């Protein structure tokens, strides 16, 4: 176990690590995430004794790190740093051999055991073909692998890695993460600083999410990697899906349409404007990303509807109805209330049947602002024998209603209706 | 099967024979160097004198004058050249390893000019006998240490050693001490010529005592540095990386920096500035046997010894009866070599 207690570190006057108390336990793969400059690398260096904290302690198995010599620390934990540039020509085997430094007396050579460990590591990591190659002539993925091999050759209980997969191709990223998992299964503690949220979500047991030198959240993936946490730490909107195949969550950043670049204050004003979307059958997918700046609600949609899944991933309020059921009285009342409360209602280009006709009817009850997206004629979408068409034609004529022919004009229309 | 391949690939065993061949060539060169000189002494006599001095009884006769020439004039001088060459070779390995830069040597970073100033000062003040033979190397070491500590601290930032700061401060320190040397020489005309010639680098007039002192410094320095060779290897990936595998980086650096300074400054104290050996030799040896600093130290010692032995031989026989300061010769060799390195680096895109 490696733990820290009230760890603090400042560089000049800037506090880089603020009161971090944390425990990393045996047999777990930990991912450290957080935006650039949040102190991830510094935390690793403090845990490994490369940097000394201004305040607080680090413990390995409840023994204060300060009681260890540099050589003893190297027998307890190995760390792979971000840069591995070598000025001179060293062979791969020579680099890996360095990992045994702490175990070899200054005045003696490598023992049989050291030799065996080096050969084992080379075989385990499949580096036999590279062992006599010049380190500087390897690809960056191969170089990283050699440095990881060196760390493994230290035969420590704890392995710290600082962005070991950055700038590498996806095959190396996965290979390394799989490798770390095998060492975790062997009982090691592996702590990896990562920048890819999805790699972390897929491979790590627990996530430490850092923000501005402190712990934002720590624990199970689903608890830590939430829309709110990511929004707070990285300042981006994401959709979080569960991957049906792997069972792990999958995070997708949402594309922001840069409509307010000239006037960033607009973002805050738009956040306060409520828009309700009437959609269904997957029709909302084109419009939702474009209006993500506003406070959005969706409905009525049926359970199992694609639009419902999307709206939930995006964290919007949704009025729902049972799967494949017509809109009930209860949902209709809810919808009616919402339609009056919001600043704007958008009716997406959807087909109407008996089941969802009330989605159309509700608009006759309000005098609120409405935008109708009409990409195809209502006749083609009417499966109610003309009932929908007649309601629709009334709506189009109403005051405060705008009809747009293409979704590309939606932002313009919204601004015409509600001013922002 | 796998084991067998691994064992064949382990080229460790080849190094010993190569090293033995190198040492054999060196010994032959030493004998040759003792034989060659302005006074012709036949080869069998040289052999006889050498073997006799080692305690063997030889059935050849020679004059006392001939014995003096060989044992008092030539042999200590040749051995001095060999030892100083070895010292400069290993000091070069350490400098390049510590500063992680193949175009650094102890001279470029100002050790020679500071040690030279110490030497000049001691001679001009007439205090070279104050602590008998130890005065010169001690004063040189003190001034070199001041230089190296200044340069090191100037170029060290919190996270790394700035190469440009290192080279710039090295140049600044070099000029500073050179100016001081010129200053004191300007005001002491009676010593000026002697000191200038002295500092140009020469093994002329080496005594056995001087040789033994240098040899003791060499053996100790070499032995300690050899055991720090693994540390030097580890540092190639950066200080943090070295520390993470268990190297006490700060302590290792201090030890190696101090030894490098001691080795270089004591050669300057006795033999003046002999440039570029510390630059060229580690380079050539690295091409030959790779970058492993332990091996490199051993081979650079032998290589440096070999280079300086022959350089001295050429320097004293090229324009007889005059003797050329050997420092001039090594600089003549080293200048073009340095240019070659720059071109090579430029081609490989390392030089921006």
Image (spheres, coloured by chain):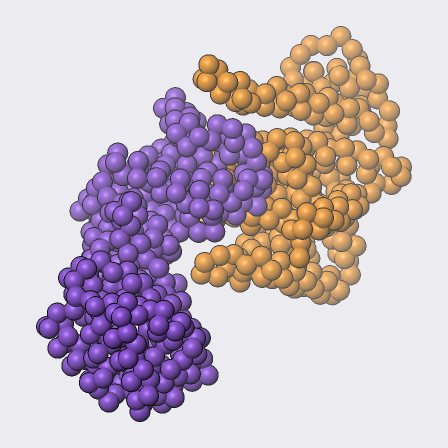
Chain letter for the orange part? B
The answer to whether any part of residue B325 appears in the image is no
- Seen from the viewer's position, the closer of residues A22 and A28 is A28
In the rendered image of this protein, does residue A23 appear above or below residue A55?
above
Q: Position of residue A133 (x, y in %)?
A: 56, 33
Outermost residue toward the bottom in this view: A399
The residue lying furthest to the left in this view is: A330
Q: Residue at x 66, y 39 (%)?
A: B283
Which quarter of the rendering shows the C terminus of chain A?
Answer: bottom left
Q: Nearer the viewer, residue A112 or A268?
A: A268
Residue ranking furthest to the right: B320
Q: Is residue A282 left or right of residue B18?
A: left
Of the pair A171 and B22, the residue shown nearer to us: A171
Residue drawn at point x = 17 percent, y = 47 percent: A62
- Is the residue B226 above or below the residue B160 in the image? above
User: In the picture, which chain is purple?
Assistant: A
């Amino acid at each position: 176990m490696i733990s820290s207690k009230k760890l603090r570190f400042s560089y000049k006057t800037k506090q880089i690590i603020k009161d971090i108390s944390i425990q990393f336990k045996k047999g777990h793969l930990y991912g450290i995430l957080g935006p650039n400059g949040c102190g991830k690398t510094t935390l690793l260096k403090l845990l490994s004794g490369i940097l000394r904290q201004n305040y607080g302690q680090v413990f390995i198995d409840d023994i204060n790190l300060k009681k260890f010599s540099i050589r003893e620390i190297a027998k307890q934990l190995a760390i792979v740093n971000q840069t591995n540039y070598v000025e001179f020509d060293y062979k791969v085997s020579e680099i890996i051999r360095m990992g045994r430094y702490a175990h070899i007396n200054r005045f003696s050579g490598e023992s049989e055991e050291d030799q065996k460990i080096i050969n084992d590591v080379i075989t385990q990591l499949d580096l036999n073909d590279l062992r006599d190659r010049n380190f500087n002539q390897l690809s960056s993925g191969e170089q990283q692998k050699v440095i990881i091999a060196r760390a493994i050759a230290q035969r420590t209980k704890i392995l710290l890695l600082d962005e070991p997969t950055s700038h590498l191709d996806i095959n190396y990223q996965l290979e390394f993460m799989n490798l770390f998992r095998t060492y975790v299964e062997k009982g090691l503690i592996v702590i990896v600083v990562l920048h890819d949220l999805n790699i972390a979500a897929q491979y790590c047991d627990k996530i430490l999410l850092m923000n501005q030198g402190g712990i934002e959240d720590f624990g199970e993936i689903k608890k830590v990697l939430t829309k709110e946490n990511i929004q707070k730490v990285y300042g981006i909107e994401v959709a979080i899906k569960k991957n049906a195949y792997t069972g792990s969550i999958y995070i997708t950043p949402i594309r922001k349409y840069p409509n307010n670049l000239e006037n960033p204050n607009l973002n805050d004003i738009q956040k306060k404007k409520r828009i309700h979307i009437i959609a269904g059958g997957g029709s909302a997918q084109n419009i939702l990303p474009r209006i993500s700046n506003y406070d959005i609600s969706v409905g009525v949609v049926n359970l199992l509807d694609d639009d419902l899944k999307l709206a939930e991933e995006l964290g919007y309020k949704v009025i729902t109805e049972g799967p494949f059921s017509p809109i009930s009285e209860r949902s209709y009342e809810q919808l009616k209330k919402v339609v009056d409360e919001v600043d704007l209602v958008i009716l997406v280009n959807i087909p109407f049947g008996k089941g969802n006709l009330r989605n159309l009817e509700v608009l006759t009850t309000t005098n609120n602002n409405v935008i109708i997206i009409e990409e195809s004629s209502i006749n083609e979408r009417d499966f109610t024998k003309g009932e929908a068409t007649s309601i629709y034609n009334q709506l189009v004529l109403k005051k405060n209603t705008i009809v747009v022919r293409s979704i590309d004009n939606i932002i313009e229309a919204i601004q015409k209706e509600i001013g922002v | 099967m796998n084991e067998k391949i691994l064992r064949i690939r382990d080229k460790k065993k080849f190094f010993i024979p190569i090293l033995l061949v190198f040492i054999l060539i060196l010994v032959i060169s030493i004998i040759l160097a003792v034989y060659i000189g302005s006074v012709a002494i036949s080869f069998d006599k040289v052999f006889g004198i050498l073997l006799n001095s080692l305690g063997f009884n030889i059935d050849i006769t020679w004059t006392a004058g001939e014995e003096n020439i060989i044992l008092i004039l030539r042999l200590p001088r040749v051995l001095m050249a060999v030892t100083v060459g070895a010292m400069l070779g290993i000091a070069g390995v350490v400098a390049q390893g510590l500063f992680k830069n193949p175009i650094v040597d102890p001279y470029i970073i100002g050790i020679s000019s500071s040690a030279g100033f110490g030497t000049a000062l001691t001679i001009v003040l007439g205090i070279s006998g104050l602590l008998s033979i130890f005065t010169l190397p001690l004063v040189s070491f003190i001034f070199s240490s001041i230089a190296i500590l200044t340069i090191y601290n100037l170029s060290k930032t919190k996270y790394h050693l700035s190469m440009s700061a290192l080279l710039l401060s090295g140049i600044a320190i070099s000029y500073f001490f050179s100016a001081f040397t010129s200053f004191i020489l300007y005001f002491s005309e009676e010593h000026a010529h002697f000191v200038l010639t002295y500092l140009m680098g020469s093994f002329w007039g080496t005594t056995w005592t001087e040789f033994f002192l240098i040899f003791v410094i060499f053996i100790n320095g070499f032995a300690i540095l050899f055991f720090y060779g693994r540390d030097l290897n580890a540092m190639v990936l950066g200080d943090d990386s070295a520390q993470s595998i268990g190297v006490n980086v700060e302590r290792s650096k201090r030890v190696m920096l101090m030894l490098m300074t001691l080795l270089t400054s004591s050669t300057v104290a006795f033999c003046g500035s002999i440039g570029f050996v510390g630059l060229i030799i580690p380079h050539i040896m690295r091409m030959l046997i790779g970058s492993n600093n332990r091996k490199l130290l051993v081979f650079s010692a032998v290589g440096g010894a070999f280079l300086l032995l022959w350089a001295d031989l050429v320097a004293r026989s090229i324009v007889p009866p005059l003797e050329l300061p050997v420092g001039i010769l090594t600089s003549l060799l080293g200048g073009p070599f340095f240019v070659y390195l720059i071109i090579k680096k430029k081609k490989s895109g390392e030089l921006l």
